[in-house]
Image: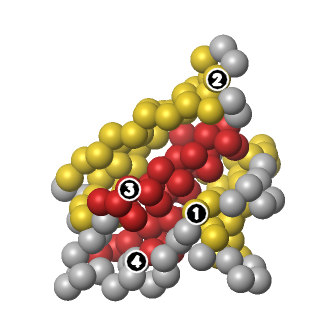
Amino acid sequence: MSYLFLDHTGDIAVRVTAASLDRLFEEAAAALAATIVDAAAVRTDRRLDVTLEAPAPDLLLVDWLNELVYRFETDLWLAGRAEARVWQAGEVWQLEAKTFGEPLDEARHRVKVLIKGVTYHQLAIQETAEGIETVVVFDI
């Protein structure tokens, strides 16, 4: 696990670290799933693809996580695992991701908390000695 939940007043904050930008997006999706339900209970035998673009990688990360929140709210989709590819194409950052999961099954998934969205609070993607790091704040 490359994420750590942090103390935060009124919301949920998580520090995500990874060796690459692709892995950072994947780990952030895992942290989102773990915030909503016990992620270990999510089966990963179905696939949902997501394609997004944004003017900066940190904005793309917020869009990515908000897309997963939207998919949960509208389709009850839980992404138990993700494979992400992130790259810069000229002035735009692109994301192609495969999410593997399933719809919410109330018999197996206990919803811990509902997330309204991902905020821009403390948003920054930084290189560190461990790789790449960010702090994501979920509005609950």
Dot 3 alpha-carbon crowd within 10 angstroms: few under 14, some 14 to 19, many 20 or more: some
Residue placed most toward the observer, 91 or 38: 91
Per the model, the C-alpha gap separating discs 1 and 2 is: 23 Å
Front label number (2 vs 3)? 3
Per the model, the C-alpha gap separating discs 4 and 1 is: 16 Å
What residue lies at 34% left-to-right and 73% top-to-bottom? 40
First reached walking from the N terminus: tag 1 or tag 2: 2
Q: Is residue 103 visible?
A: yes
Type of the residue with mark 2: Val
The dot on residue 37 is 4
Residue position for label 3: 71
Residue placed most toward the observer, 50 or 80: 50
The dot on residue 109 is none
Per the model, the C-alpha gap separating discs 4 and 3 is: 15 Å
Type of the residue with mark 3: Arg
Residue position for label 2: 92
Front label number (4 vs 2)? 2
Q: Residue furthest front?
A: 74
Task: Tell me whether the residue at label 4 lies in contact with that at label 2, contact meaning CB atoms closer than 8 angstroms.
Answer: no
Percent x, y of residue 100: 30, 52
Q: Quadrant of residue 89?
A: top right
Q: Quadrant of residue 76?
A: bottom left
Task: Tell me whether the residue at label 1 lies in contact with that at label 3, contact meaning CB atoms closer than 8 angstroms.
Answer: no
Front label number (1 vs 2)? 1
Type of the residue with mark 4: Val
Residue position for label 1: 117
Percent x, y of residue 98: 35, 42
Is residue 61 placed above or below 14 in the rendered structure? above
Type of the residue with mark 1: Gly
- Judged left or right of residue 1, residue 39 is left
